[in-house]
Image (cartoon, helix red, strand yellow):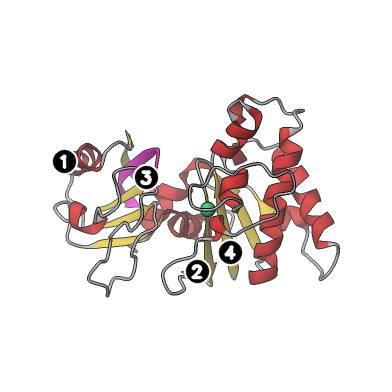
Amino acid sequence: MIGGIELGGTKCIVAVANNPLDIIEKKVIPTRDPKSTISDIVSFFNNFKISSLGVGSFGPLVINSESDDYGLLVAESKKGWKGVNIVEELSNINSNIILDTDVNAAALGEYRYGAGKLSETLVYVTVGTGIGVGILLDGRPHIGNFHLEIGHMLIPNSDNFRGVCEIHDNCWEGLASGPSMQTRWGIEASKLSESHEAWVKEADLLAIGLVNIISNHSPDKIILGGGVMNQKHLFPILRLKVKEIWNSYTPLDSLSQLISEPGLEDNSGIVGSLSLTL
Ligand SMILES: [Zn+2]
């Protein structure tokens, strides 16, 4: 039996499974302060005997397993969590912990079992509370020196809207995440009607980021998940905007093939976290 944790800024999903697609038991735990959240996670696993534990976590955090700080959250992206070492805190559950970023884990889930099967350069983007991106090259995450932070790339801010990122004025996450939409339009994104102008603006902003990713990584698949992307009507507008901005510079594959919904729906993260153990 294997264990998996998708540790998100809003909620954690914990699960035990025979294999990533055969989940035995799963629970959703709201993410609060580190102490009570971790205590709930640990008590879930008390009832099971697992051989290893895969964790996909929000960051930024140290994912180099050779580092003395393996598992350390290095910034206050979630209030109260800076300085918490995820691997240390979870070591009572199991000593064999494989940790990666939440988006690398979700990308892995989609690569193995979802819409990204056999994709050589797979990009997974989540657009929700924040924007995060994981990139897999032949199924292995592209980490770089620390890990990628593509959600914080700077993009044009034509109407001088003040982005919601506390670090940057005009990064992708600050201008196009769920909280940013709420600030811009004064209403939660999920409550905006399909015909609202907000979606064209959102597609514009997302397309700029995607074109930057296409320029940098030439992916054969970009999968978009997260709360904002549950608005399926956003996909066709987004594909059209990407096409417009790219302007036939190089041939792109069929845009509905290139830019796709997750194959695992809302389960990319937990299936991917479980997959880290394999
Ligand atoms: Zn930022």
Distance from Cα at disc 1 to Cα at disc 3: 29 Å
Mark 1: amino acid: Asn
Residue, disc 3: 78
Please tell me which residue lies in front, 56 or 185: 185
For the point 77% across and 28% down, the residue is: 195
Please tell me which residue lies in front, 119 or 259: 259
Residue, disc 1: 47
Question: x, y percentage for residue 175?
Answer: 62, 45
Mark 4: amino acid: Leu
Q: For mark 1, give the secondary structure.
A: loop
Mark 2: amino acid: Gly
For the point 18% across and 40% down, the residue is: 39
Distance from Cα at disc 3 to Cα at disc 2: 29 Å
In the rendered structure, which segment of residues is drawn in magenta?
Answer: 9-23
Residue, disc 2: 139
Q: Considering only order in the chain, which callout, 2 or 3, is on the residue closer to the N terminus?
A: 3
Q: Quadrant of residue 116?
A: bottom right
Q: Considering only order in the chain, which callout, 3 or 4, is on the residue closer to the N terminus?
A: 3
Q: Quadrant of residue 86?
A: bottom left
Residue, disc 4: 122
